């Protein structure tokens, strides 16, 4: 095996590793988006513990 083919195989391995990292990142992003969609459909509302007084309460529209 000559130096050029060895270098080419190392570059190919690095490119494959980079593609794997990108694929993993995209998969995680897709899973997070699906999780948020499911939580929205199930009515999972975010916590209102850290918002100001009167935010997120009921609105009286009968007046």
Image: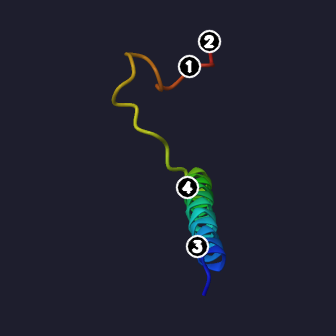
Quarter residue 7 falls in = bottom right
Seen from the viewer's position, the closer of residues 21 and 5 is 5
Instruction: Of the two numbered discs 3 and 4 on the same chain, state the one appearing first in sequence.
Output: 3
**For residue 42, above or below residue 7:** above
Q: Nearer the viewer, residue 36 or 43?
A: 36
Mark 3 to mark 2 CA distance (whole Å): 69 Å
Q: Are marks 2 and 1 in contact (CB under 8 Å)?
A: yes
Specify the quadrant of the image occupied by residue 31.
bottom right
- SS state under label 4: helix
Label drawn at residue 32 = 4
Task: Name the residue carrying label 3.
Answer: 13
Viewer-side label of 3, 4: 3
If you read the primary sequence from the N terminus, does the residue marked by circle 3 or circle 2 appear first? 3
Q: Residues within 10 Å of mark 2 (few under 14, many from 20)?
A: few
Query: Secondary structure beneath disc 1?
Result: loop
Q: Mark 2 sits on what residue?
A: 63
Residue at image position (65%, 74%) is 4
């Amino acid at each position: 095996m000559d130096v050029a083919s060895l270098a080419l195989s190392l570059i190919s391995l690095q490119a494959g590793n980079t593609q794997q990292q990108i694929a993993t990142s995209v998969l995680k992003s897709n899973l997070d988006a699906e999780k948020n969609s499911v939580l929205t459909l199930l009515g999972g509302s975010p916590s209102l513990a850290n918002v100001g007084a009167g935010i997120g309460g009921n609105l009286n529209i009968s007046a």
